[in-house]
Each structure stands twice: as C-alpha cells, then as structure tokens.
Image (cartoon, grey):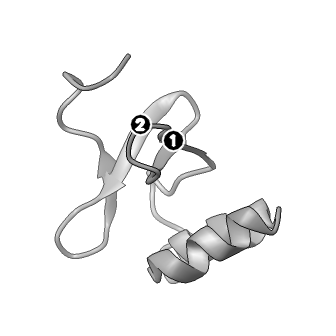
C-alpha cells in the first residue's frame, strides 16, 4: 500500500477509496478490514474487522493483530 496516496485520500475525505487502496487484491480474505481509524500519536492507520484489530502479515495477508499491549 502506498502510504502517501493513502494519507492524501484521507486528507481529501475519500475514506472509502483509502480503505479500498489498503485492501486491494485481498478483498475476499477472512480478516480483510471493514474500517480504519488514524492513530493520533503516529498518524498511521489502525485497521479493524468488526471490532477486532487486524494487520497484514509479511506476505500481505490480513490477520488478527497479535499484540494488544499498545491498545487503549
């Protein structure tokens, strides 16, 4: 995923397009995110499938987030 393009889409208010960019090519996976929020500290997106946090693994396949120590 192109972080710069993702950020530009978010700044322009095109959130559906930004989410589409993040999941491009992985739409039919079990844990493909359905929404995201921006982390206020880092400015990076945090992806969710329902109310569970998900992240891509090394190969780009979406999985449940492994560490939850930095949540909340």
Element type at marker 2?
A: strand
Side of 72 relative to 33 (left or right): left
Identify the residue at image location x=18%, y=32%: 67
Image-quadrant location for residue 17: bottom right
Q: Position of residue 7 (x, y in %)?
A: 59, 69
Q: Which residue is the site of mark 1?
A: 48
State the mark number for residue 53. 2
Cβ atoms at labels 1 and 2 below 8 Å apart: yes
Q: Decide: is 6 above or below 68.
A: below
Q: CA distance from mark 1 to mark 2?
A: 4 Å
Task: Tell me where residue 64 appears, x and y as whole percent.
Answer: 31, 42
**Which of the marked residues, 1 or 2, is nearer the chain's N terminus?**
1
How crowded pointer 2 is (Cα within 10 Å; few <14, some 14-19, many 20+) is rated as many
Q: Is residue 33 left or right of residue 67?
A: right
Residue sitting at 47 percent across and 83 percent down? 2
Q: Nearer the viewer, residue 43 or 34?
A: 43
Binning the other alpha carbons within 10 Å of mark 1 as few (below 14), some (14 to 19) or many (20 upward) gives some
Snapshot quadrant of residue 5: bottom right
**Which numbered dot is residue 56?**
none
Q: Secondary structure at mark 1?
A: strand
Q: Position of residue 16 (x, y in %)?
A: 77, 64
Quarter the C terminus occupies: top left
> From the viewer's perspective, is residue 64 above or below residue 2?
above
| Res. 60 in view | yes
Question: Which quadrant does the N terminus fall into?
Answer: bottom left
Q: Which of these two is toward me, 44 or 52? A: 44
Instruction: Name the outermost residue toward the right.
Output: 13
């Amino acid at each position: 995923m192109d972080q710069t393009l993702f950020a530009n889409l978010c700044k322009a208010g095109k959130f559906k397009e930004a989410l589409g960019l993040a999941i491009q090519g992985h739409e039919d996976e079990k844990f493909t995110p359905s929404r995201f929020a921006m982390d206020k500290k880092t400015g990076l997106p945090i992806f969710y499938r329902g109310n569970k946090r998900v992240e891509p693994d090394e190969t780009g396949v979406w999985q449940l987030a492994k560490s939850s120590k930095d949540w909340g």
